[in-house]
Image: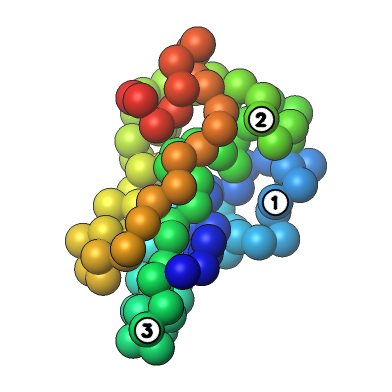
């Protein structure tokens, strides 16, 4: 099992995990994430999508800071790469984000 790929949508350049991601376009992240998961799983390695969801939107780029935003941005930007990868290649696992949105853990939305 590998704890990859990181398909978070990056919206804050100071976030310490920016270098592990594929940028900020949700659709392209979904396509690239699908290719990575497909490659891992064809080789017998279980892939884990990270971090469901809005982890790359944290306040001030703090790794565990709040990621407050509207539900529209949450669904259209941050959930879309996960939807695409799950639909296309069925990854073995999904790691939850450790941010909260409006006081609620992001993965509980």
- Nearer the viewer's eye, disc 2 or disc 3? 3
Mark 2 — residue?
64
- The spot of residue 13 in percent (x, y) is 74, 45
How many C-alpha atoms fall within 10 Å of the one at disc 2: few (<14), some, or many (≥20)?
some
Mark 1 — residue?
17
Above or below 102: residue 28: below
Quadrant (top left, top right, bottom left, bottom right) of the C terminus: top left
Kindly indicate the quadrant of the structure image that contains residue 88: bottom left
Residue 103, disc: none
As helix, strand or loop, the secondary structure at mark 1 comes to loop
Q: Front-most of 44 and 79?
A: 44
What's the CA distance linking mark 2 and mark 3? 32 Å
Q: Front-most of 53 and 26?
A: 53
How many C-alpha atoms fall within 10 Å of the one at disc 1: few (<14), some, or many (≥20)?
some
Task: Determine whether, in the image, residue 87 is placed left or right of residue 46.
Answer: left
Mark 3 — residue?
44
Determine if residue 35 is in view. Answer: no
Above or below 85: residue 98: above
What's the CA distance linking mark 3 and mark 1? 26 Å
- The spot of residue 80 in percent (x, y) is 34, 49
How many C-alpha atoms fall within 10 Å of the one at disc 3: few (<14), some, or many (≥20)?
few
- The spot of residue 68 in percent (x, y) is 54, 20
- Residue at the image point whose x is 26% and y is 70% from the top: 89
What's the CA distance linking mark 2 and mark 1? 11 Å
Task: Determine whether, in the image, residue 53 is placed left or right of residue 88.
Answer: right
As helix, strand or loop, the secondary structure at mark 2 comes to loop
């Amino acid at each position: 099992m590998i704890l990859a790929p990181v398909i978070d949508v990056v919206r804050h350049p100071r976030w310490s995990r920016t270098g592990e991601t594929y940028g900020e376009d949700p659709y392209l992240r979904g396509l690239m994430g699908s290719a990575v998961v497909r490659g891992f799983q064809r080789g017998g390695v279980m892939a884990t999508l990270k971090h469901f969801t809005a982890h790359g939107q944290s306040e001030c780029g703090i790794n565990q800071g709040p990621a407050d935003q509207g539900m529209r941005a949450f669904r259209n930007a941050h959930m879309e790469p996960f939807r695409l990868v799950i639909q296309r290649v069925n990854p073995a696992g999904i790691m939850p984000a450790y941010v909260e949105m409006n006081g609620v853990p992001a993965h509980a939305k």
